[in-house]
Image (tube, rainbow, N blue to C red):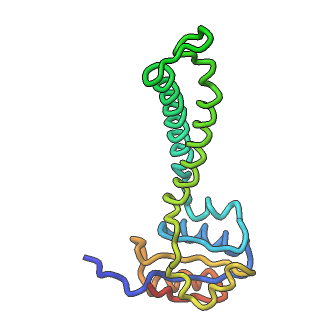
């Protein structure tokens, strides 16, 4: 049985976007799967390089929109046909054309709320603390440095071997990430 790691992982610091993308590709090709990259601006090809898969967020938004649509329509039907059946101007109690605007609005509202709450949940937010904040040079992640962190939870992680691998990628520095 593998003993629990004393560190969260190892982090390599790079000085250019092309260097971090190349390092991430090599790490993925070497078999590392539990890794993350931190950059001061979005790099389109970096997600693919670290093996990022598509999110379940579109499905969450779709389900939220469908539930909002059904809920809005059901509420209007219940109010006008069951709870308070008032005949106004000779129209039928179930007058579906008049239900369309509110049904549309509840669809949009529920989809938007599902998007926000689903994004927060799927990203594990709010996260006021993360172990990478313990690395002193990580403060430059919002300025001009690029970081690749391989987590100790990775099946292929070995402290010495992973450090040698990261150093072979020619980073500026390789740091231990304390939990």
Q: Give the residue furthest to the bottom.
A: 136
| Nearest the eye: 66 or 74 | 74
Q: Nearer the viewer, residue 97 or 119?
A: 97
Q: Quadrant of residue 87?
A: top right
Locate the C terminus by quadrant. bottom left
Q: Nearer the viewer, residue 61 or 40?
A: 61
Q: Residue at x 50, y 39 (%)?
A: 63
- Horizontal side of residue 10 vs 16, given as left or right: left
Q: Is residue 23 left or right of residue 40?
A: left
Q: Position of residue 26 (x, y in %)?
A: 59, 70
Residue lying at 24% horizontally and 76% vertically, measured from the top left: 1
Please tell me how many numbered marks the rendered image carries: 0
Q: Position of residue 132 (x, y in %)?
A: 54, 81
Q: Is residue 76 above or below residue 155?
A: above
- At 73% from the left and 70% from the top, the residue drawn is 41
x and y, in percent, of residue 112 in the image: 60, 47
10 w.r.t. 71: above or below: below
Decide if residue 148 is on the left or right side of residue 18. left
33 over 144 or under it: above or below: above
Instruction: Provide residue 129's location: percent of width, then percent of height.
Output: 51, 79
For residue 90, which quarter of the picture? top right
Q: Residue furthest top?
A: 90
Q: Residue at x 57, y 88 (%)?
A: 174
């Amino acid at each position: 049985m593998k003993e629990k790691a004393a560190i969260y992982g190892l982090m390599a610091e790079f000085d250019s976007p092309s260097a971090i993308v190349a390092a991430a590709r090599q790490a993925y090709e070497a078999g590392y799967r539990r890794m993350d990259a931190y950059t001061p601006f979005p790099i389109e090809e970096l997600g693919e390089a670290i093996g990022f898969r598509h999110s379940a967020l579109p499905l969450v938004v779709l389900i939220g929109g469908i539930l909002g649509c059904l809920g809005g329509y059901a509420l209007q039907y219940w109010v006008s046909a069951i709870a308070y059946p008032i005949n106004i101007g000779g129209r039928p109690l179930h007058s579906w054309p008049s239900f369309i605007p509110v049904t549309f609005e509840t669809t949009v509202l529920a989809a938007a709320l599902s998007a926000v709450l689903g994004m927060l949940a799927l990203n594990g937010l709010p996260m006021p603390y993360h172990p990478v904040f313990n690395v002193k040079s990580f403060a430059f992640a919002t300025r001009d440095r690029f970081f690749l962190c391989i987590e100790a939870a990775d099946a292929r992680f070995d402290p010495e071997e992973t450090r040698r691998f990261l150093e072979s990628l020619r980073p500026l520095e390789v740091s231990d990430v304390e939990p």
